[in-house]
């Protein structure tokens, strides 16, 4: 174990639903000389604090009513500044182990996983493992830098591009679809990451224009695919903000019909994370999409807080299981059980089940064995140009 001193000046957040545990950990930290810590009594309260100001360290209980520690980890991953995490739980050590794998698959640094009741020496030992995060590479521009004007011009010009990632039918190895992923090559800023463009477009009230521009491009590209003899489904991502304005569904339908194509050949991907923000609204938007003929996929399943009842009501056609499940499955029996239960849920709801982010042959084999219909990920193909997609799909069909 490292002999570094305890990092006493760290901004620390302690999250536990049990007031007694909160008091015990607070006392341990005070005794150790920690100067700057706050407490939160559940995952939602913790997220509010974290959105308010960055923390360097988070000590978090796994078992909390409402948003538990695992769901909190999933939501954390979208924050700009991630705290290093110490997980606490009264669960059996194997549950702690798989929880660590999940959190690490989400890109979090886990300093340690401690059983309850928390032992002073064990806590101090894992806190000593803290190292400041390396500065983030300036790969993507801050979303604030992409102005209203830049987005508007980019949509009309050449900044907006699409890459296609194949979706493979596991039993046959054939490419049966592809997901259109936004790429943005800004004339001034260079390449801007998709999530940053989306956030900037949402803030600039241009997200509908952007989504329709992506669809228009995809519809044109499907025309090229068909001319090359490749008839595959194209999926595109829809932001939750898009579903606030229900007329966008009619506009999407008009784009597809205007090109003489069928809505059945397109899939709207909606991420699970925000489904529960406005469930009634989401339900209406998705029902309308289905009535227009579009297919609907629940994206990144397992990272959000959608309840089973809500998922059962959704008129979706596909369940895309998040990479954190796929990645954890080969690592432990518990990871495998969790992956299997997500697959079983999708199959029981009669959905096409897709494993997302398949990177290795082992993950691909497990996805097939455990019952996924489709796979998507670097193992089958990285996001590629339309020409490459035409070549790859022609070769497998
Ligand atoms: P997503 O819809 O879940 O798309 C999958 C993301 O995972 C893509 O990242 C893809 O490049 C990446 N990926 C694919 N295979 C693997 C793998 O094997 N391993 C790993 N580690 N990653 C893999 P990308 O292109 O950076 O997109 C990120 C997210 O941005 C997308 O996640 C989607 O939520 C959003 N996005 C992309 N294009 C659009 C768009 O046109 N509209 C909206 N609203 N969102 C978009
Ligand atoms: Mg997607
Ligand atoms: Mg996804």
Image (cartoon, rainbow, N blue to C red):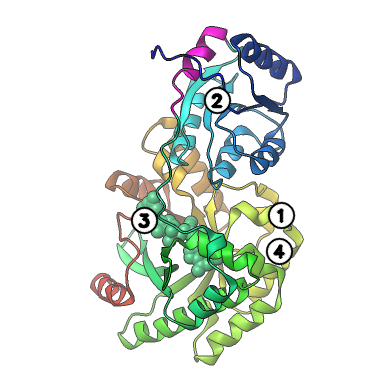
- Dot 2 corresponds to which residue? 87
Foreground residue, 294 or 128?
Answer: 128
Q: Is residue 122 magenta?
A: yes
| Vertical order, 289 against 46 (above or below) | below
- Bin the neighbour count of mark 1 within 10 Å (Cα to Cα): few under 14, some 14-19, many 20 and up: few
| Vertical order, 36 against 323 (above or below) | above
Foreground residue, 305 or 78?
Answer: 78
Give the alpha-carbon distance from disc 3 to disc 4, as whole Å: 28 Å
- Dot 4 corresponds to which residue? 283
Residue 159 falls in image quadrant:
bottom left
Q: Residue at x 60, y 87 (%)?
A: 254
The residues colored magenta run 119-131
Q: Which mark is residue 377?
A: 3
Give the alpha-carbon distance from disc 1 to disc 3, as whole Å: 28 Å
101 sits to left or right of 302: left
Return the x and y of residue 111 as percentages of the image width and height.
47, 25
Ligand 1 lies under 8 Å from the Cβ of mark 3 = yes
Q: First in sequence: mark 1 or mark 3? A: 1
- Dot 1 corresponds to which residue? 277
| Vertical order, 219 against 277 (above or below) | below
- Bin the neighbour count of mark 2 within 10 Å (Cα to Cα): few under 14, some 14-19, many 20 and up: many
């Amino acid at each position: 174990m490292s002999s570094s001193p305890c990092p006493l000046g760290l901004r620390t957040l302690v999250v536990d639903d049990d007031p007694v545990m909160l008091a015990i950990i607070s006392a341990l930290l005070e005794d150790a000389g920690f100067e700057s810590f706050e407490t939160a009594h559940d995952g939602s309260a913790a997220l509010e604090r974290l959105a308010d100001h960055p923390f360097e360290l988070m000590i978090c209980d796994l078992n909390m009513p409402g948003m538990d520690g695992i769901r909190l980890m999933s939501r954390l991953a979208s924050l700009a500044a991630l705290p290093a995490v110490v997980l606490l739980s009264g669960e059996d050590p194997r549950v702690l182990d798989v929880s660590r794998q999940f959190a690490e698959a989400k890109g979090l640094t886990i300093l340690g996983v401690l059983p309850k009741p928390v032992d002073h020496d064990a806590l101090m030992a894992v806190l000593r493992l803290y190292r400041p995060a390396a500065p983030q590479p300036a790969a993507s521009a801050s979303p604030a830098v992409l102005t209203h004007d830049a987005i508007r011009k980019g949509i009309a010009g050449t900044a907006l591009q699409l890459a296609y990632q194949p979706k493979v039918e596991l039993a046959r190895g054939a490419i049966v679809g592809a997901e259109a992923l936004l790429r943005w090559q800004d004339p001034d800023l260079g390449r801007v990451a998709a999530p940053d463009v989306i956030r900037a477009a949402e803030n600039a009230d241009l997200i509908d224009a952007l989504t329709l521009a992506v669809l228009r491009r995809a519809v044109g590209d499907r025309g090229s695919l068909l001319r090359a003899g490749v008839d595959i489904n194209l999926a595109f991502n829809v932001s939750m903000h898009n579903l606030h304005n229900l007329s966008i569904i009619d506009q999407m339908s008009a784009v597809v019909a205007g090109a003489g194509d069928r809505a059945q050949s397109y899939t709207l991907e909606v991420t699970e994370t925000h489904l529960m923000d406005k469930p009634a609204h989401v339900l209406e938007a998705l029902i309308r999409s289905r009535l227009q003929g579009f297919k609907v996929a629940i994206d990144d399943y397992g990272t959000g807080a959608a309840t089973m009842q809500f998922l059962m009501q959704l008129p979706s056609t596909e369940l895309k299981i998040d990479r954190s499940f796929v990645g954890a499955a080969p690592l432990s029996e518990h990871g495998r059980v969790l992956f299997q239960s997500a697959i079983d849920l999708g199959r029981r709801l009669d959905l096409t089940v897709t494993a997302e982010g398949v990177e290795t042959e082992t993950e691909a084999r497990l996805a097939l064995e455990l019952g996924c219909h489709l796979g998507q990920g670097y193992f089958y193909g990285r996001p590629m140009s339309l020409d490459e997609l035409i070549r790859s799909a022609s070769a497998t069909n």
